[in-house]
């Protein structure tokens, strides 16, 4: 399970000693980020570079954030004052078997890749608990998304002690060709709020994900408020449109 917990400890230690700063111009988000060498991003306006999930995404950060990954597979951001809370940007994720044998590594070929199909699968999967029902939400500069907030159902039977909250854990997605055997999942009281959009890149339709992740419902409310400047400022690259 490639859960948010994998980045929490490393970032927490680094953020404890980091002060704030400001930037008056739009900067390219550094891409040489790792768990052993997190990137630090201070308040300002940013744009993703050529090594990111999609070059040219614009966003605004308030406060200091850290990242352990900014590449084709993921951009993750963690606020300085809440190192267990996370914001993820992804593209073209697919649903995986959520619990039991083959969880996380088994793509579900019967679940479509569109926002409607993915949201319907999440909302109808008994391994998940729907916290907030699916709605249509426009974020950023006219980015129309389908959104849902989910947690793990009490009845989930993950069947893998690698998740500390086993059996109350469940996997959601992977990125074929980039994530290998890793997947994104949640466990215990963790909740995730997803915004999923269909976008057109050079004539091809892709799915774009903005994801807020926290250890419980209260912390999800905290990361939602902290992330509001990002959600409000998010812009697609020139030539990329909502499908």
Image: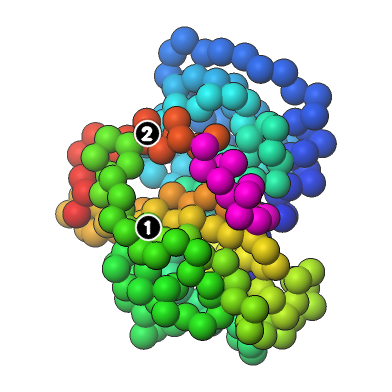
Q: Position of residue 45 (x, y in %)?
A: 44, 22
Start-end of magenta stretch: 215-225
Residue tagged 1? 147
Task: Identify the mark nearer the N-term, 1 or 2.
Answer: 1
Q: Quarter holding the C terminus?
A: bottom left
Mark linked to residue 114: none
Left or right of residue 45: residue 5: right
Q: Are marks 1 and 2 in contact (CB under 8 Å)?
A: no
Tag 2 secondary structure: helix
Quick one: 203 or 137, which is closer to the camera? 137
Q: Say whether residue 13 is left or right of residue 152.
A: right
Circle 2 Cα neighbour tier, 10 Å, few/some/many (<14 / 14–19 / ≥20): some
Q: Residue at x 46, y 35 (%)?
A: 228
Asked if 86 appears above or below 4 in the picture, the reply is above
In the image, residue 224 lies in the stretch drawn in magenta: yes
Real-space Cα separation, disc 1 to disc 2, in angstroms: 15 Å
The answer to whether 191 appears left or right of 38 in the picture is left
Residue with the most extreme top position: 24
- Residue 148 visible to an observer of this rendering: yes
Q: State the residue position of label 2.
A: 232
């Amino acid at each position: 399970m490639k859960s948010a917990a994998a980045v929490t400890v490393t970032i927490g230690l680094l953020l404890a000693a980091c002060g704030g700063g400001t930037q008056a111009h739009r900067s390219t988000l550094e891409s040489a980020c790792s768990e052993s060498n997190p990137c630090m991003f201070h308040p300002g306006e940013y744009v993703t570079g050529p090594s990111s999930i999609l070059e040219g995404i614009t966003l605004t950060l308030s406060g200091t954030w850290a990242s352990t990954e900014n590449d084709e597979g993921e951009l993750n951001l963690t606020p300085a004052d809440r190192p267990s809370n996370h914001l993820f940007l992804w593209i073209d994720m697919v649903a995986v078997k959520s619990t039991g044998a083959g969880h996380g590594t088994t793509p579900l070929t019967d679940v479509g890749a569109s926002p409607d199909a993915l949201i319907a699968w999440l909302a109808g999967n008994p391994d998940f608990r729907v916290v907030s029902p699916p709605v249509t939400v426009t974020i950023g500069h006219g980015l129309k998304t389908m959104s849902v907030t989910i947690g793990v159902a009490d009845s989930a039977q993950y069947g893998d002690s690698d998740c500390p909250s086993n059996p109350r854990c469940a996997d959601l997605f992977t990125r074929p060709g980039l994530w290998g055997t890793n997947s994104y999942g949640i466990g215990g009281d963790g909740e995730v709020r997803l915004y999923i959009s269909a976008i057109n890149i050079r004539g091809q339709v892709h799915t774009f994900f903005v994801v807020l992740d926290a250890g419980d419902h209260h912390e999800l409310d905290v990361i939602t408020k902290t992330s509001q400047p990002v959600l409000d400022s998010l812009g697609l690259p020139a030539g990329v449109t909502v499908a």
